[in-house]
Amino acid sequence: MALACITFLFLFASVSVGQANADTAIRLYLDNKLLQPEVPPRLVGNTTMVPLRIVSEELGAKVSWNQADKRITVKKDERVLRLYIDKTKAFVNGDSYLLETAPLLVKGSTLIPVRFVTENLGLKVIWDKSTRSVSLINTGEVAVSGNLPDKTSSPVPAGAAQAPGLSSSAAASTSPSSPKPTPSPSAGMFSSQPSETTKPGISSSPSASPADDGTNGNLPVVNRIERSEDGLKIAAEGGSIKPEVSGLSDPERLVIDVPGATLGLMMNGENMVQNGEIPVNDSYINQIRYTLFQGNSSGVRIIVDLKQKIQYNLLESQESGEWTLQLGPMYTDTKQYQVVLDAGHGGTDPGNTSVGGRYEKEFNLAIVLKLAKVLEEDPNISVFLTRQDDTAVKRADRATFANNLKADIFISIHGNSYRKQSASGTETHYTRDDSKELADVLHRHIVPATGFIDRKVRKSNFQVTRETVMPAVLCEIGFMSNPQEERTMWDEQFQLRVAEAIAAGIKEYLQVP
């Protein structure tokens, strides 16, 4: 089942943060000048957070706040940084940048990850543990937006240590080694084979970090490999990626190769100090391992050690650099029919906005989840969802998901909208002639359940009904732009009634008792 992509929430709202006392406050220096911000730097987890305005203005940058669209703008020379409330990304000269830790607003001061400062305002950062101080040195060298710096920083002086959350050669004495024995997938993603004796981890040899070793240039940096309910999220910053997955046996595992990518110093928001292993405890996965290796091709390899043979499906999110590996139980043919339910839109694609200000994506998902629950009670039907939460899934991937499953039918749920609020009614769409019978049967059940005007079955050219190879329909339940219908559509009992009607139509079409 589809899963929610990993999301980074950018907050510009008051956050309750424990105040450091005078003895433990972190001092902030810029070019050896002690700065006196109202709120001192602090550690949030493993990330050093520094005040944005005082650092920016000391460098001659201008900082402004736009209340209308909740935007912070920092301008210095030809560089423009834009940060938004409740947005998943910051922007540097129009290029997106994923923040490792959400900024904080503390007593009117905005604190942001020090890594964002170093890469975009041309600073080198030194953390002195003995004095609990952060020193910012103006080097004038600005890294490419969205990537870890291409050049390593100068060595940290004796007695000093790297600030948590930074990427420089002083802290980059780690380099993932090779994985446990894993035969190369038949597709042969990389010519370099993994070691047969060493599992992925952090070596003790003093070398530059993978992203800073001078050989990888501006490769995308894989910085998220996370388990989420019933899937695996893989995300990178600094460019797009295209993972390729293969299943292997004895023991059961999945090998995910990400060609043309590299690793940085951070994984899942933390320093990579866990020997290249991500602990997992669920019914499918024993553990997740990752490594960087090079040969004729460079790339990242992720090994998912499984507890059992499973089904999997790889989908690209609409968010650049993010992928979802759906995981589910192995289909054993104990059920006769496979039904794919598609909740239209999702994630960054909200669909229509109702007259009450709610999003179509929420309505679509509510109907699909209720429908899935009804169908799952039938011993003859296996139910698969293109998404089961607020995930952005491309339309083409929804069709591919159903086609790969060799599903028997595909049903997409939507809420309609029109510029005139008087528009109302229920309609059902199909594209290919072999889908018309399914559309007719479902429509006959849905209309009385909604109580809305019958707008008939219509032949249309929607991508999800066009590119699927099985009978496929798209159901427009009602008009979210119509005040009366919108109020009804958000009613729980209405949604359950519609879900039960669609389920009855599915069973009639499949001739299931």
Image (cartoon, rainbow, N blue to C red):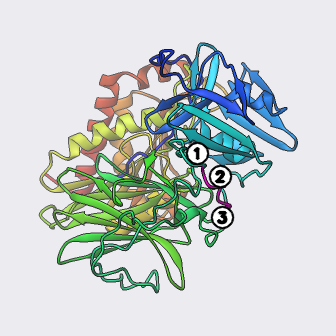
Between 484 and 263, the residue placed more toward the observer is 263
Q: Residues within 10 Å of mark 1 (few under 14, many from 20)?
A: many
Amino acid of disc 1: Leu
Which of disc 3 and disc 2 is earlier in sequence?
2
* 374 vs 20: above or below: below
Q: Can the viewer see residue 471?
A: yes
Q: Give above or below for 220 relative to 48.
A: below
Is 245 on the left-hand or right-hand side of 43? left
**Residue 152: in magenta span:** yes
Q: Nearer the viewer, residue 164 or 86?
A: 164
Instruction: Name the secondary structure under disc 1.
Output: loop
Q: Secondary structure at mark 3?
A: loop
Q: Look at the numbered disc 2 and give the secondary structure of its residue.
A: loop
Total label count?
3
Confirm whether residue 481 shows in the render: no
Per the model, the C-alpha gap separating discs 3 and 1 is 15 Å
What's the CA distance linking mark 1 and mark 2? 7 Å
Indicate whether residue 22 is drawn in magenta.
no
Tell me the kind of residue under disc 2. Gly
In the rendered structure, find residue 69 and report the number of the disc placed on it: none
In the displayed structure image, the side of residue 263 where residue 444 appears, left or right: left
Range drawn in magenta: 150-156
Q: Which residue is mark 2?
A: 146
> What residue do we see at 79% from left, 29% from top?
58
Residue visible at 78% across and 46% down? Answer: 93
Residue at 82 percent across and 32 percent down: it is: 61
Q: Which residue bears the numbered disc 3?
A: 218
**Residue carrying label 1:** 98
What is the distance, in whole Å, between disc 2 and disc 3 at their CAs? 9 Å
